[in-house]
Amino acid sequence: MTDTDPTPLPMFYKNPEALSKTAHADLAMQTSNDYRFAAAANAIPLMATEMPQAMRSYPIVFAGDDNMPLALTGLQQGENVFVDTDGHWAPGHYIPAYVRRYPFVLAGDASDARLTLCIDRAASSVTTTAKAAQASPLFKDGEPTDLTQNAIKFCEEYQTMFNQTKTMVHLIDTHGLLAEQTSKITLPDGESHTIGGFMGIDEGKLNALEDTAFLALRKSGALGAIYCQLGSTNSWQALLNQRG
């Protein structure tokens, strides 16, 4: 399946529908920088190409069935310390593509190479031209507008990044470089949190790799992701600072 397997629904999505110029002829979107839909996400999917930017703000871990990268945005369930009560993302911090893609997403069956652009009708930014005259329509004269075309392009690029990242992680895992890790975080008030249940790069095994294996990782582009994950451990303090 793709990362958009509708069962269960991907994080954030509540009522995704395949876009149709007949069924959604009057659908529109309001310009919004409201990220409250992500306010309860303490970990957000991250693609390998994003890791150099994301590592400055978030600890990066590998988790889930496929050990895909995640940016940690909180210390506990239901907490994203980078989204304030007004829905603003903390200034100066990278916003993951998974968040910026919302409310659009590509969906399809693994046996079918064709993917369909969907939109979450439950998103607060989604409306109709009748309800909000200033909103940007998704279709005009029966054809996709630039907004819809750009959404298609972004989602296709995201799917490509997803597939590349999955391949990289598989190669990293094949060389035995992933190991279960835990981090103990002590807050300024003395409260401690032990964060576990995730995988990270085993630096000792990385340094012990044979030259041929190291070269294979370099040629695949996986080395960049490896070093970004290792470097992101310095961002635990940034997470604490943002939490306040």
Image (cartoon, helix red, strand yellow):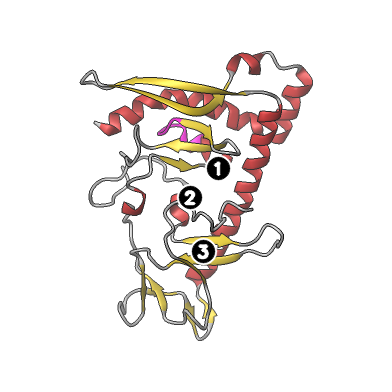
Residue labelled with disc 2: 98
Farthest residue to the front: give it.
7
The reply to whether residue 150 is in sight is no
Q: Nearer the viewer, mark 3 or mark 2?
A: 2
Of residues 179 and 94, which is closer to you in this image? 179
Q: Residues within 10 Å of mark 1 (few under 14, many from 20)?
A: many
Residue beneath disc 3: 151
The residue sitting at 45% across, 43% down in the picture is 44
Sequence-first tag of 3 and 2: 2
Question: Around disc 2, counting alpha carbons within 10 Å, would you say few (fewer than 14), some (14 to 19), or many (20 or more)?
Answer: some
Location of residue 117 in the rendering, given as x and y in whole percent from the top left corner: 55, 66
Q: Is residue 145 magenta?
A: no
Majority secondary structure in the magenta region:
loop
Left or right position of 205 against 52: right
Q: From which residue to which does the magenta span run?
A: 52-59
Which mark, by number, is residue 47? Answer: 1
If you read the primary sequence from the N terminus, does the residue marked by circle 1 or circle 2 appear first? 1
- Dot 1: element: loop
In which quadrant will I find the C terminus? top left
The alpha-carbon separation of the residues under discs 3 and 1 comes to 18 Å
Of the numbered discs 3 and 1, the one sitting upstream in the chain is 1
Would residue 1 be seen by someone viewing this image from the given angle?
Answer: yes
Q: CA distance from mark 3 to mark 2?
A: 13 Å
Q: Amino acid at mark 3?
A: Ala
Residue 107 in the image, given as x and y percentages of width and height: 58, 61
Q: Residue at x 29, y 33 (%)?
A: 242
Amino acid on which the number 2 mark rests in the picture:
Tyr
Residue found 52% across the figure and 83% down from its top: 22
